[in-house]
Image (cartoon, coloured by chain):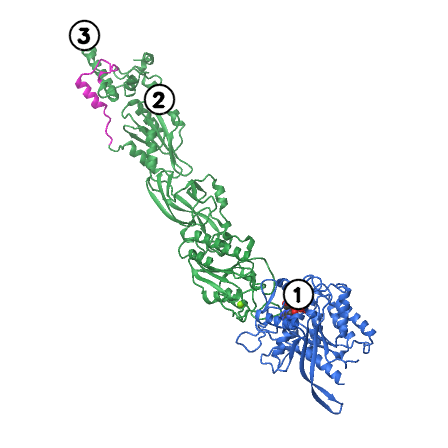
Chain colours: A blue, B green
């Protein structure tokens, strides 16, 4: 382990097509502005800056999901904040405010989604963005992408200190092919890490934040509610439901349990197998959050959906955006990495 | 005189009276003509003069005898007839003959017309009347009998029998034969003549049916016909004899029958519905009662239920006993459903002409066929209906257009067929889609017009606008139900029906397991619909495509009838709603006005 030569920690945003990466990024910008803590996000180049501005506008003003972008993997952002980390010995614990700087990249999945079928037309992208309505697009199994793409992805993953892995339980439920792809990628990554002697006790060195996306979807939210995982943050004036990170893994499991394809459950097993338990954390996230009716302050469980089918093939957003657990995975990763540095 | 007569008088014992040729019996004078038989002419002082006087007296007597007969035949011309023995009588003699020929006035005698008309009126049930006309030409028989409807029909019973056939011994020349019939019988052996007459008359009488009889004597006082009349009277018990000048009897009978009172009521066949079981029975109501006369007019109001293409049948029947109706006239016409005035005039016995309804034409179908068309039960349309048409305006544009088209078709049809003012009121509620956009607000999702006459509703339909694709999995059915629940109140005597034409299920009241967004107003379709159901709102629905799911409201919205949009038919909807009568309860016969609607007993 030698990260000292790096000024900045690299975070990779990874997930199957339509798992919600674009929306996550778009929401990230909103989350940053809504956060009570001091956060800054900026693009490393003009296209990256433009993406943030455009996609946020799309979400908040056009009230649509940002269209799939071919060049997503070429974009890069830097997130800056401060965080308190524990320092000192077992006897004398102290906290210390340290700057947090994260380099955020999107890890492009191999496959035809962006590589072979460029989407130029907005409606087409919308089709793509439907997620669980897609029939045949997306991952094409382990051999779907070109070997070059796969190589590149493994390189990128290997380069990351932390990974934000987006998992759409609904989509996985319906497609059930996530495991093949995920499992293969992790196996290749492990092999690469083994070659670079980076494995720790046979596990990958990465910090791994698993985000169950689209928490606002009835099937996710209702499952969490039914299992009793919902908590409320007393500081949240809107009282939006959340799943405490301690329960998020259970939720993940539960969602995999009810999945029509049991293979999805194996994703959970693979994470356990390849990553060190203390370096894995689950989050229930939503890019758009729950609906808040005009002139109301509090979340209403009787009418909470913020995403509405638009009557065509797509979806639109009903009200304001209240991202849930979008910043938190990054914050967690930042802290993990900082404490690692500080050790 | 006929040559055959001397042969008749050959037998010595049958020596006849020299004047009338009747058999001479003991006594001073002939019983028949009064000729003094016992005048001791052979003891005369002057036998020759006495003989001459006797001859003159005999000739006078014969002339007087014959003159009477001739006066019966012809009281003026007869005087000069060559039939009178001893030449034409002088004026005094003729006047005497004419006086003698005049038949005795019997005060009880009635005119033949009157007698026949009374006899016809007295006929009961299945009786027939036999009319026997005995006249100068011969004997003719007429029979009058009731036909299947009980109407009398009259006509000759066989060919008339002329005297020449009945009594071949009578003269061939008409004038001479009349003279003989009228009493100029001096040339005949009376016993034989009467025997021949009896044989002939009884032969006729033997062919006649039993029953009331009127014997008409057209030549009163003529001995031969009178004897025939007497024979007939004795032969047929209770026969009434009427004397007098006779018109043509066949025609007279027809006239009298036609002018006579109805012997049996003529009744119009109606379908009568049992209020409990709704079973249909055929009954009839008198159009013309017994005793009605030609020219009488009758009227009756009936209710015509929707009929098939052959229209409503107006059947007039008579009842024979209580068994089967006998159709007298069966005609039909296609009429709009509703009350109709029936006006008929009795043109003659057995003949009815309908003045109203117009356009009736004879119905060729058999009675059994018509009776077979009567459905077992009749579920009559509701008396007054409040129809609430709810239509979903969002979704596929073609679907929305098809829904509106269906509604337009329905309203037009109902406007045409349920046109009684006030009977049908229609409300129109078009519901679009919830916006689910916090910036737009939820606004009005239901638009339309409350209960109005059908004609106004067509205009309202044309003001409904396509509301776009809307929310895919649901539509604001619940908001529409809020409008219904808020506006509609059950009213006595008015059936209320909610017709929903749409594609999607309602939004749930609250978010649940399903992904469907709840109604942003929190309306609860289940509760609303339950309330309307309990309040007695009937439900008919047309759904684009059959569907399932937790919010599948359609089976409840289509509780009475649920159709797919593709095969929904305005007429069937009208039937389901209860404004139009069901196809299989099309009634070929009119109903009494009282039972036209469901709640009228
Ligand atoms: N309900 C809900 N749907 C989401 C959310 N984020 C993404 N989606 C849906 O998932 C689709 C794909 O998201 P996207 O961000 O384009 O996925 P990517 O392909 O991984 O970039 C979007 O078009 C949305 O329909 C979310 O937070 N809530
Ligand atoms: Mg609603």
* Image mark 2: chain: B
Left or right of B102: which side holds A275?
right
Residue for badge 1: A132
**Distance from the alpha carbon under mark 2 to that under mark 3:** 47 Å
Residue for badge 2: B162
Residue stretch in magenta: B79-106
Residue for point 34% across, 35% down:
B257
- The quadrant the C terminus of chain B occupies is bottom left
- Closer to the camera: disc 2 or disc 3? 2
Residue for badge 3: B48
Classify mark 3: residues with Cα within 10 Å, few (<14), some (14-19) or many (20+): few
Q: Does residue A4 lie above or below B287 as drawn?
A: below
Q: Secondary structure at mark 3?
A: helix
In the image, are marks 2 and 1 on the same chain?
no
Classify mark 2: residues with Cα within 10 Å, few (<14), some (14-19) or many (20+): some
The answer to which of B198 and B346 lies nearer the viewer is B346
Is there any visible trace of residue B313 in the rendered image?
Answer: yes
Q: Does residue B525 lie above or below A341 as drawn?
A: above
* Image mark 1: chain: A
């Amino acid at each position: 382990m030698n990260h000292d030569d790096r000024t900045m920690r690299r975070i990779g945003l990874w997930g199957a097509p339509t798992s919600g990466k674009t929306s996550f990024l778009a929401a990230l910008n909103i989350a940053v502005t809504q956060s009570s803590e001091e956060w800054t996000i900026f693009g490393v180049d003009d296209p990256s800056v433009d993406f943030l501005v455009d996609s946020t506008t799309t979400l908040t003003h056009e009230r649509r999901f940002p269209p799939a972008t071919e060049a997503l993997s070429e974009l890069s952002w830097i997130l800056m904040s401060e965080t308190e980390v524990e320092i000192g010995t077992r006897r004398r614990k102290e906290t210390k405010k340290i700057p947090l700087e994260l380099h955020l990249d999107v890890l492009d999945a191999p496959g035809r989604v962006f590589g072979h079928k460029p989407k130029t037309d907005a409606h087409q992208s919308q089709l793509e963005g439907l997620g669980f309505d897609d029939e045949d697009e997306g991952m094409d199994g382990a051999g779907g992408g070109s070997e070059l793409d796969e190589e590149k992805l493994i390189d990128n993953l290997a380069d990351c200190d932390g990974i934000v892995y987006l998992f759409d339980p609904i989509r996985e439920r319906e497609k059930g092919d996530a495991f093949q792809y995920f499992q293969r990628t992790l196996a290749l990554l492990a092999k690469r890490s083994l070659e670079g002697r980076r494995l720790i006790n046979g596990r990958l060195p990465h910090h791994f934040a698993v985000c169950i996306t689209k928490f606002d979807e009835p099937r996710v939210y209702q499952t969490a509610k039914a299992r009793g995982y919902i908590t409320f943050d007393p500081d949240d004036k809107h009282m939006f439901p959340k799943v405490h990170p301690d329960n998020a893994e259970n939720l993940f499991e539960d969602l995999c349990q009810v999945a029509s394809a049991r293979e999805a459950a194996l994703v959970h097993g693979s994470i356990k197998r390849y990553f060190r338990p203390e370096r894995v954390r689950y989050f229930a996230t939503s890019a758009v959050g729950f609906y808040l009716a005009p002139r109301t302050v509090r979340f209403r469980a009787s009418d909470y959906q913020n995403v509405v089918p638009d009557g065509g093939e797509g979806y639109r957003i009903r009200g304001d955006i209240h991202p849930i657990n979008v910043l938190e995975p990054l914050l967690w990763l930042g802290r993990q990495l900082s404490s690692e540095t500080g050790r | 005189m006929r040559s055959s007569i001397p042969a008749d008088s050959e037998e010595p014992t049958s020596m006849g009276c020299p004047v009338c040729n009747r058999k001479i019996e003991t006594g001073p004078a002939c019983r028949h003509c009064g000729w003094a038989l016992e005048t001791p002419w052979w003891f005369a002082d002057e036998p020759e003069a006495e003989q001459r006087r006797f001859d003159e007296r005999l000739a006078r007597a014969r002339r007087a005898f014959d003159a009477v007969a001739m006066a019966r035949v012809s009281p003026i011309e007869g005087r000069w007839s060559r039939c009178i023995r001893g030449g034409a009588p002088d004026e005094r003699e003729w006047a005497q003959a004419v006086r003698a020929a005049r038949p005795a006035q019997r005060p009880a005698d009635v005119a033949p017309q009157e007698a026949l008309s009374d006899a016809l009126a007295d006929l009961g049930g299945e009786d027939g009347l036999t009319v026997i006309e005995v006249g100068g030409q011969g004997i003719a028989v007429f029979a009058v009998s009731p036909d299947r409807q009980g109407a009398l029909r009259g006509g000759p019973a066989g060919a008339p029998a002329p005297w020449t056939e009945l009594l071949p011994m009578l003269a061939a020349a008409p004038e001479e034969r009349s003279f003989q019939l009228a009493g100029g019988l001096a040339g005949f052996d009376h016993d034989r003549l009467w025997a021949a007459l009896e044989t002939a008359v009884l032969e006729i009488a033997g062919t006649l049916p039993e029953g009331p009889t009127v014997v008409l004597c057209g030549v009163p006082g003529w001995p031969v016909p009178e004897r025939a009349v007497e024979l007939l009277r004795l032969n047929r018990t209770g026969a009434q004899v009427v004397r007098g000048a006779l018109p043509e009897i066949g025609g007279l009978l027809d006239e009298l029958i036609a002018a006579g009172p109805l012997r049996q009521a003529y009744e119009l066949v109606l379908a009568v519905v049992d209020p409990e079981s709704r079973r249909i029975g055929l009954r009839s109501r008198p159009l013309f009662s017994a005793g009605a006369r030609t020219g009488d007019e009758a009227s009756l109001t009936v209710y015509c239920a929707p009929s098939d293409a052959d229209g409503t049948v107006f059947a007039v029947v008579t009842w024979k006993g209580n068994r089967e109706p006998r159709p007298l006239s069966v005609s039909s016409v296609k009429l709009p459903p509703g009350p109709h005035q029936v006006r008929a005039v009795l043109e003659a016995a057995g003949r009815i002409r309908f003045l109203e309804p117009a356009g009736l034409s004879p119905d060729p179908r058999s009675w059994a066929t018509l009776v077979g068309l009567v459905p077992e039960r009749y579920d009559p349309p509701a008396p007054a209906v409040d129809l609430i048409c709810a239509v979903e305006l969002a979704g596929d544009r073609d679907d929305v257009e098809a829904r509106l088209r269906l509604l337009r078709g329905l309203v037009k049809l109902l406007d045409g067929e349920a046109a009684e003012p006030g009977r049908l009121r229609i409300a129109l509620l078009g519901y679009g889609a919830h916006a689910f956009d916090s910036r737009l607000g939820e606004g009005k999702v239901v638009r339309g017009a409350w209960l109005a006459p059908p004609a106004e509703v067509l205009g309202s339909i044309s003001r409904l606008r396509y509301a776009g694709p809307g929310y895919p999995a649901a539509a604001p059915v619940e908001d529409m139900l809020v409008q219904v629940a808020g506006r509609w109140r059950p009213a006595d005597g008015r059936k209320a029906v909610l017709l929903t034409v749409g594609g999607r299920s309602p939004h749930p009241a609250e978010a649940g397991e399903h992904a469907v967004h709840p109604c942003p107003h929190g309306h609860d379709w289940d509760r609303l619909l339950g309330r309307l159901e309990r309040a007695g709102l009937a439900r008919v629905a047309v759904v684009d495509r059959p569907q399932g799911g937790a919010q599948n409201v359609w089976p409840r919205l289509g509780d009475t009838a649920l159709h797919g949009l593709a095969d929904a038919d305005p007429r069937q909807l009208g039937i389901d709603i209860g404004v139009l009568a069901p196809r299989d309860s099309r009634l070929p016969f009119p109903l009494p006005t009282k039972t036209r609607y469901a709640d009228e007993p």
